[in-house]
Every structure is written in structure tokens, then in C-alpha cells.
Image (cartoon, rainbow, N blue to C red):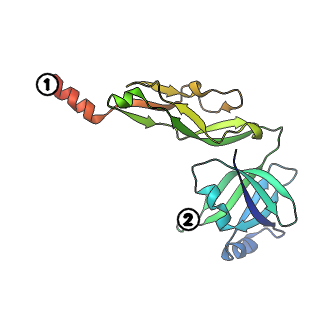
Amino acid sequence: MKSITINGSQRESVGKVSTKALRNAGMVPCVVYGGDKAVHFSAEELAFSKLVFTPNAHTVVIALDNGTSINAILQDIQFHPVSDKILHVDFYQLFDDKEVTMNIPVNIIGNAPGVLAGGVLNRNQRKLRVKALPANLPDFIDADVSELNIGNKLYITALANDKYTFLQPDNTVVAQVRVSRAAMKAAQEAAKA
């Protein structure tokens, strides 16, 4: 899985006043959970653009100014309701022997025969929740739709892998080919004639 480095400086004072001063200076207060104790730090808002505003999933290397680096994943992010500025970011620390849960994007591959016959491909799931060791986390999950005819569905069970487990039910539909409106209308007009 691809990794993004975020440079930050550790925070000593945690509270309303210091957090407001950080935000006014263009910094984002952050915290890393999952280790022995929570690590509070701050980073520039622009450092999060490649992590937040992308459909891809990434791990994060947090490089603090005291020389320590922490491997983590994005756990939660809070935005300002009006200006959409990042207010706060929570990370979860990664350990090589501890499974982690993450949303992984779905990559549709292949050409569905049902689409070529006049159907429409619906992507029901753009991301799937996966649980795996950090080394086994994929960049994306390939969903092959080359066997789907009109009315067929691709279930999550067809994407099963030994390296990770899905946290959705087995009857979750990832993609399906449905009859298009134009084809339905043509069939109705043909039935009337």
C-alpha cells in the first residue's frame, strides 16, 4: 500500500486556547491513538491534501520534529461546517502483528457483456471495509465484471482473498448490470405493436 509522509511537531499544551491558536496559524491539531499513550501533534493543513481529497487509500508516516516517526492510518477527520477547513484529524497507529480495519476502493476491470447488449453497469459499492495485517492491505480491490450479463450481480463473495477479510455481509452487491431505460422503453413499444 502506498504511504504518505506528514511532517508535524509535537504539542505540549492541549486545550481550547492552544488549539484555536494553532488553527489561526494554519495548522491542524492531530492525535495518534493505538500505542501506549496518545501522541498529540500538529501539522500544516496543506500536508493533508493528498491524503484526504483522494479516492485512494493510503497509510501515513508521521514524522515528528523530535526525530520519531509513527506508522498510522487515517481514522477520523473533522471539517468546519461552513468553510470545509480541516479542524481535527485522528490517526490509528499500525503494528505489524495487529490487524487493522480500513476502507479500500473498488477498481472495476473488464467489459460486461450485458453493457454491450444495452444494459447499464451500476457500481453499488465504491469502497469496501477490509480487515487485515498492515502488510496485507491492498491499494485497491479488483472487481472483474467481464461475466455479467443483463440482470446479473457481482457479490462480495466473488472477491474473497486469503490476505484480508471483508466486514460486509456475504450478500453485499458490488456491481450489477441492469436494463437501461431506453431498452425498457423499446421493449414496451415493441410489445404494444
Residue 112 in the figure: left or right of residue 86:
left
Image x and y of residue 146, in percent: 47, 27
Residue 104 appears left or right of 122: right
CB-based contact (under 8 Å), mark 2 and mark 1: no
Q: Position of residue 179 (x, y in %)?
A: 33, 30
When asked about the image quadrant of residue 169, the answer is top right
Residue under label 2: 84
Q: Residue at x 78, y 55 (%)?
A: 32
Which residue is more in the foreground, 46 or 111? Answer: 111
Instruction: Please identify the quadrant where the N terminus is shown.
Output: top right
Question: For the point 80% across and 60% down, which residue is it?
Answer: 63
Considering only order in the chain, which callout, 1 or 2, is on the residue closer to the N terminus?
2
How many angstroms separate mark 2 from mark 1 (CA)?
A: 53 Å
Locate residue 186, reporting x and y percent: 21, 30
Where is residue 16, by image quadrant?
bottom right
Q: Is residue 104 left or right of residue 43?
A: left
In the picture of the structure, the residue carrying the numbered disc 1 is 192
Residue 170 visible in the picture: no
Amino acid on which the number 2 mark rests in the picture:
Asp
Tell me the crowding category of disc 1: few under 14, some 14 to 19, or many 20 or more residues within 10 angstroms, Cα based. Answer: few
Q: Secondary structure beneath disc 1?
A: helix
Judge depth for marks 2 and 1 and give the one in front. 1
Query: Alpha-carbon neighbours of circle 2 within 10 Å: few (<14), some, or many (≥20)?
Result: few
- Quadrant holding the C terminus: top left
